[in-house]
Amino acid sequence: MSPGTAASANPGLAIKDLENRRHTSTFQPRKLATATRAIMKFTIVTLAVVLPALLASGMAAPASNDALVEKGTEDVGNPSWWDPDPHRPPGGPIAGPIAGPIAGLTAGLTAGPTGGLGIVVMWKKTLTRVTSTMAGYAPSHVGPPSSSLQPNIPAQPPTDLETVLNDEIKEWHFHIYFHQRNASSHHAALELRDAVLRLRRDGAFVAVPLFRVNTEPIGPHPVGSYEIWVPAETFSSVFSYLCMNRGNLSILVHPLTRDQRADHEQRAAWIGPPLPLDLDTLPLRSDDVPLQYPSLKLGYSSTTPPFSLEDRRRLGANIEHLLRNEKEAARAPPRM
C-alpha cells in the first residue's frame, strides 16, 4: 500500500502527514531564489525604463530663457552655465554615464542561477557612478549667472594701463559678523571694534566703523554685524590687522562701486568662514559711486594728483631692472 493510500484510509495518519509536510516545507531555497530574482527583475526593468526618461526631462538644459529669467536676469539660455562639458551625450549630464550600467543590469538577469552576484556588483557600480557624476556636474550655485549680475567682465583680464588705473577700487567695506545671541561672540566683536578705533586715533591706519552696531540681521547680513569703511590708501594695513586679530569672527571684505550686488558676491572676499548673504535686498546697480566721508579727502574723494602714465611706466621699468637677478621672480613679457 502506498503512503497516499494509507493516509486516505486512516484519517489520523493523514493529519499527521500534513503536519510533517508543513514543518518540512517552511523554508524552500529554490522558491525564495525565484521570488528574489523576480523582484529584482521588476525593479531593474522599471529603473531602466523610467530613470532615463526622468533624467532626460529633469536634467536636460533649459530650452528657453523664460524658465530661468527672473528679477532682471538675461542671456541665460546657454546650457553651458550648468554643464561644463558641451560634448556630453544628449540626455543631460547623468543619463549618458548610467546608460551602460543599466544595460548591464538588464543583461545580467538572463545569466541564470549564477547571475545574482553579477547583478549586485553591477548595481553597486551604477550607484557609485551616478553619485560621482552628480557630484561632478551638479550646479555649484543657485540660478544661472547673468550679465546683470556680472557687470563689465571682459573675456580676458585687461592690460591697458589707463583702463586699469581708471577702474581701480578706491574704497572698501569690512563687515564683522558675530552671533548676536552668543555673549562671547558679541563681546569679541565689540572688543575688536574698540581696538580699531584706538589704533585709528593713534595713527596706525584710517578706518571708520559705522556708529551703529547691528544686533539683529539687517539688509543682506544674516547675523549681528557692523561695518568698517576703509580707503584704498590704508587698505593693506587694516586687512593685515584684521587677519591677525579676528579671533573666531567672520569678516566680509567687498569693494564700493556702483554694482552693489556684484560687490557683495562676485567681487567679495572673506576672512574666516563665509556666511550666506541675502543678496535680494541689494540693488543691482546704483547711479552714483557710494563714496563716504569726503571730509577725509581719501578714497574716491582724494585730491592728491595721481602718477602720470609715463611715471608709472618708468616705475615699472625700474622694478623689472631690480628683479632681473632674482631667480624666483617671473619675467614680464616684452611691451608690444
Image (cartoon, rainbow, N blue to C red):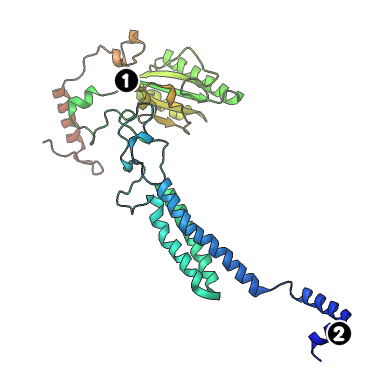
**Which residue is rendered at x = 20% and y = 41% of the image?**
331
Q: Quadrant of residue 100?
A: bottom left
Q: Nearer the viewer, residue 331 or 74?
A: 74
At which x and y percent is residue 56?
Answer: 40, 50
Quadrant where the C terminus lies?
A: top left
Label 1's element? loop
- Seen in the image, is 53 located left or right of residue 333? right
Q: Residue furthest bottom?
A: 1
At which x and y percent is residue 58?
Answer: 43, 46
Quadrant where the N terminus lies?
A: bottom right
- Among the two numbered marks 2 and 1 on one chain, the one whose residue lies closer to the N terminus: 2
Give the number of callouts: 2
Q: Is residue 103 above or below residue 251?
A: below
Which label is found at residue 206? none
**Which residue is rendered at x = 60% and y = 71% of the image?**
34
Q: Quadrant of residue 185?
A: top right
Q: Nearer the viewer, residue 72 or 169?
A: 72
**Residue type, label 1:** Arg
At which x and y percent is residue 122?
Answer: 48, 64
Q: Quadrant of residue 228?
A: top left
The residue where tag 2 is placed is 9
| Nearer mark to the viewer, of 2 and 1 | 2
Q: Is residue 274 above or below residue 291?
A: below
**Residue type, label 2:** Ala
The residue where tag 1 is placed is 258
- The crowd level at tag 1 (other Cα within 10 Å; few <14, some 14-19, many 20+) is some
